[in-house]
Image (tube, rainbow, N blue to C red):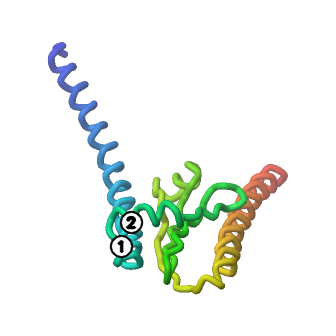
Amino acid sequence: MKESVRMERYAQRAVDKRRKEEDSNRRIGQFVLITYLAQGEHLCEALKKMSQMERQMYISQHTELIESSDGAEGINVVWCPNSQVMTHRLLSSDLRKEFNGQHYLSSWVRKVGPHQYEALRSTLRERLERRVALRQHQRNQLAMDFFEAKAG
């Protein structure tokens, strides 16, 4: 085989590999962008009477991240005057791998009054802790299945 043919094949293989990696990143990027824009739409709707600069300042001052006990995921809450914009985020790289590299799972809006903020916080913490318990249970099941297979 000629040297030029071999080098051409090597270059083509490198191009194909790079395109394959770029395609997967592009799909992940599109999903992240769509979810990010959904959060932005909710925020624009909730804070529509503010200018862009005021909106950014308000969001930076009224945002709270409620994390799960294992730190794998969290719910980002923006406390708007009449509603709350929540985004379910994946914080650990292991959990992102399970969800094909996604950083955000969903965004939604709740409308609760200021006197119900603590109840909402506790509800979100409970939801996250249920997911932690479910992940722990799945890990235990996998470990138990492995040991049972080894013993049998």
- For the residue pair 19 and 7, the one nearer the viewer reads as 19
Q: Nearer the viewer, residue 78 or 3?
A: 78
Choose top left, top right, bottom left or bottom right for residue 118: bottom right
Element marked by disc 1: loop
Q: Which one is in front, 15 or 114?
A: 114
The residue lying at 49 percent from left, 83 percent from top is 82
User: Where, quadrant-wise, is the C terminus in this rendering?
Assistant: bottom right
Q: Is residue 62 left or right of residue 143?
A: left
Residue 108 position in % (x across, y down):
47, 77
Q: Residues within 10 Å of mark 1 (few under 14, many from 20)?
A: few
Q: Secondary structure at mark 2?
A: helix
Q: Position of residue 60 (x, y in %)?
A: 48, 60
Which amino acid does the dot numbered 1 rest on?
Met
List the residue tagged with mark 1: 50
The structure residue drawn at horizontal position 57% and vertical position 66%, both measured from the top left corner, is: 75
Report the residue marked by disc 2. Answer: 54
Could you tell me how many numbered marks the image carries?
A: 2
Question: Toward the viewer: 85 or 1?
Answer: 85
Task: Confirm or deny contact between disc 1 and disc 2 (CB under 8 A).
Answer: yes
